[in-house]
Image (cartoon, rainbow, N blue to C red):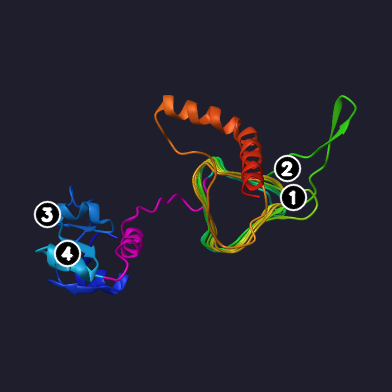
Amino acid sequence: MDQLTLGAVAELIGAKLEGDPIHLVSGLATLASALPHQVSFLANMKYAHQLDSSQAGAVILHADQAQLFSGHCLVIENPYLGYAKLSQSFAPIPYFSAIDKTAQVDPTAILGRGVNLAAGTVIGPYVNLGNHVSIGPNSVVGSHSKIGEHTNIAANVTLYHDIEVGAHCRIHSGAVIGADGFGFAKDGPDWVKIAQLGGVIIDDHVEVGAGTTIDRGALDNTIIGYGVKLDNQVQIAHNVVLGDYTAIAGCTAIAGSTKLGKHCTIAGACGITGHLTLVDGVHVTAMSLVTHSITEPGAYSSGTGLDKNQKWRRNATRFKQLEQMAKRLKQLELEIVQLRN
């Protein structure tokens, strides 16, 4: 979309416009860099001082801050959400020829209306692609897989066999869906591979980040719920279940057979061990290690925060002494009780 009037923008994001409804805008930018043909937003008050000098054609902000900007205002309860909605109108949409001549499509595959297959794509036997599915260059869809309508798969994505992806999903470059889970049985000094017989089911409106891997199930399927958002380089092991609307930031790994509830958020570089259950509404902060099930919603953390190295080293040494200190404290408490008696 090239241009929008501010009246159209206000209707699109559900904002009240304080300004000229026919003023044209054609993009988004930060408060510091925006020009008169661009819209900006204020969602963090530490940037409020930039309103005085911003040249933005309009600013999305809360009613409490509207008086701080002298230009056109798009007043909304949640400015960040308004920005998110508007950003989709200005996002460039890649488009390629309907079926590139170098695409390899098995004759048993079923393709819906308006399917786009870029150069080098491979569509395996008995694949079913819904209407308006787009698949980027050199991506592979394995046999008996199914992709719902309006799903966009970027370049160099691999979907193994028996994978189901819902409608309106987006899978970014380098993602691998359906590789074998890490399953081996010990046989003396050797390891015997456990065949991974399940698949992966991804519900509608899911986004999978670049380089993210979702392993297939050992027996049952690995399941990614409705509206789940996965950042780049996330590892989802076999038979994991992610509840609807859960979001997971980059470099987090979840071990096999763990189940996360709905509306959970897992920050970056977290580790969650296997065979656990996290209830709905659990929020885990960055670089935390989860080793036991969480039965109550809320925010959880582990590890230690950043500190000067010398102080951190002293504290790390004290951590190793906690058991000894606890025993000494218990002994002192007993002695105090004896003295009082």
Q: Within the magenta stretch, is there residue 60?
A: no
Q: Is mark 3 on a helix, strand or loop?
A: loop
Q: What element carries label 4?
A: strand
Give the x, y percent position of residue 188: 90, 27
CA separation in Å, label 4 and label 1: 51 Å
Q: Is residue 18 visible?
A: yes
Marks 3 & 1, CB-CB < 8 Å contact: no
Residue that badge 4 annotates: 24
SS for callout 1: loop
Q: In what element is the residue under mark 2?
A: loop
Disc 4 versus disc 1: nearer the observer: 1
| Left or right: 14 as drawn, with respect to 234 | left
Sequence-first disc among 3 and 1: 3
Disc 3: CA contacts within 10 A as few (<14), some (14-19) or many (>=20)? many
The residue under label 3 is 55
Q: Name the residue under label 1.
A: 217
Residue plotted at (39% across, 54% down) = 93
Whole-angstrom CA distance, mark 3 to mark 1, is: 53 Å
Residue 157's quadrant in the figure? top right
